[in-house]
Image (cartoon, grey):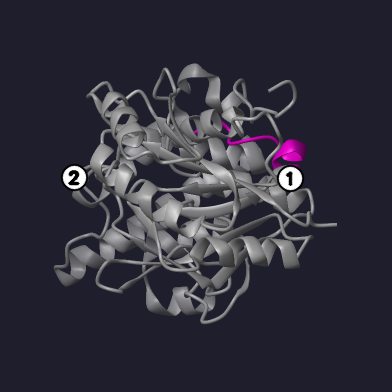
Amino acid sequence: MPPNNPKLLTVLLNWRTADMTLRAAETALREMEGISGELVIVDNDSQDGSFEQMTRIVSERGWARTRVIQSGRNGGFGAGNNVGIRAGLSDGTRADYVYILNSDAFPDPGAIRALLDHLQAHPDTGFAGSYIHGPDDEPHLTTFRFPTIASEFEGAVRLGPISRWLRNQAVPVPIPDKTTRVDWLAGASLMMRMEVLEEIGLFDESFFLYFEETDLCHRAKNAGYPTDFVRESSVTHIGSVSTGMKEWQEVPGYWFDSRRHYFEKTHGRAYARIATLSHLAGGVLHRLRCALTGRKPADPPRFLRSLLSHEFKQTPSGAAQGRNPAPRMTGV
C-alpha cells in the first residue's frame, strides 16, 4: 500500500553550473511545498568553486530541508545521482520516493506533485517522468522505446519507407498527448519508487553518461515495474548545458562505450555485435544516398568509424564485463 504521508528525496546534480543549479533548486523547493522530504544538491567534483558557492548561498538564503554535498569524484551522471540517493534524508529515515532533476531543468507549477500523486495512485508503476519543453515552449522529445537491432538500422538509414515499416521499432516515441506507459524516459525529471531501487539497485556506474536511464528503466521493467510518462507534470528544460551536446563536432568516446555496454549487458555480446553491424549497414546506405543526392550526412564526421572501433576495442575499466554493476541500497 502507498504510504499516507510519503517522504520525497529530491536529488539535484551539479557540474560547473552553480548559478543554474541554484535556480533549479529554488524552483524545486517551491514545488516541494506541502510535500514531506528534502533536497540534496550534489556537486560532482566540479573543482571550479561550485561547491563552496552553493554551500554559501544555501546558507545565506536560509533554505530549509536543503543540503549541499560533494561527490568526491566525477563518475558521471549515474554515479553522481547515486551519491545523493545514498545520502538519503538527513534524519536517517527512509524516503519513499526519489526525484532526480537536471541542473538546467525547472519544474512548472504542480510538476513534482503530479509525479508523486501518480505514483501514489499507481502502486505497480516503478518510475514516472515529466513532459519536457524548452523556455520557448517547444516540446523536447524524451519518450522512448528500448533500443534493438531493428531500431539501430532504422535510426541510421534515415529513409522514410523503412522508418514507416519499422515505426513500432524506432527508439523515439512521438510525445504522447496524455499520460501513458513507455519503455524509458530521459532523466531530466524522473521520480522513482525507493522500494524498486532497493530491489534492482541504483544507477549502473559503468555508464559515465548516456544510456544509464535506459538501463535503469530496463531493469525496472524486467522486475515488473514499468515507467509512465505523466503529461500533467511539465518541466522547462534548457538542455545540454553541462554536456555541451548541442555543440558536439564529434561524438565523444563515452557515448560509444555506454551504447556498447548497454547492449552487451541487456542482450549479450553477440546481440551487441549484430546491433552494431545493423547500424553500420544503415549508416553506409545513408551515406550512399547522401553522395548520390549531394546532401550532407546527418551524423557527425567519423561517426561510423568510431562506432566500429569502439565495438571491437578492449573496454577500459571493464564496463562491458559488468565489473562495476548497479550499486545496491544494502548497508547504505
In terms of depth relative to the viewer, which is nearer, 330 or 93? Answer: 93
In terms of depth relative to the viewer, which is nearer, 311 or 79? Answer: 79
Q: Nearer the viewer, mark 2 or mark 1?
A: 1
In terms of depth relative to the viewer, which is nearer, 150 or 119? Answer: 119
Callout 2: 10 Å neighbours few (<14), some, many (20+)?
few
Instruction: Tell me the quadrant of the picture where the C terminus can be found.
Output: top right
Which residue is drawn at the image coordinates 27% and 29% (left, top)? 50
Measured as percent of width and height from the top left, residue 81 is found at: 50, 35
In the picture, measured across the screen, residue 195 lies left or right of residue 105, that is right
Residue hosting label 1: 196
Q: Is residue 53 above or below residue 300?
A: above
Mark on residue 249?
Answer: 2
Task: Name the element at disc 1.
Answer: helix
Q: Can residue 160 be found in the magenta stretch?
A: no
Q: Earlier in the sequence, mark 2 or mark 1?
A: 1
- Residue at the right extreme, as displayed: 1
Q: Is residue 75 above or below residue 307?
A: above
Q: Which residues are magenta?
A: 195-207
Q: Amino acid at mark 1?
A: Val
Callout 1: 10 Å neighbours few (<14), some, many (20+)?
many
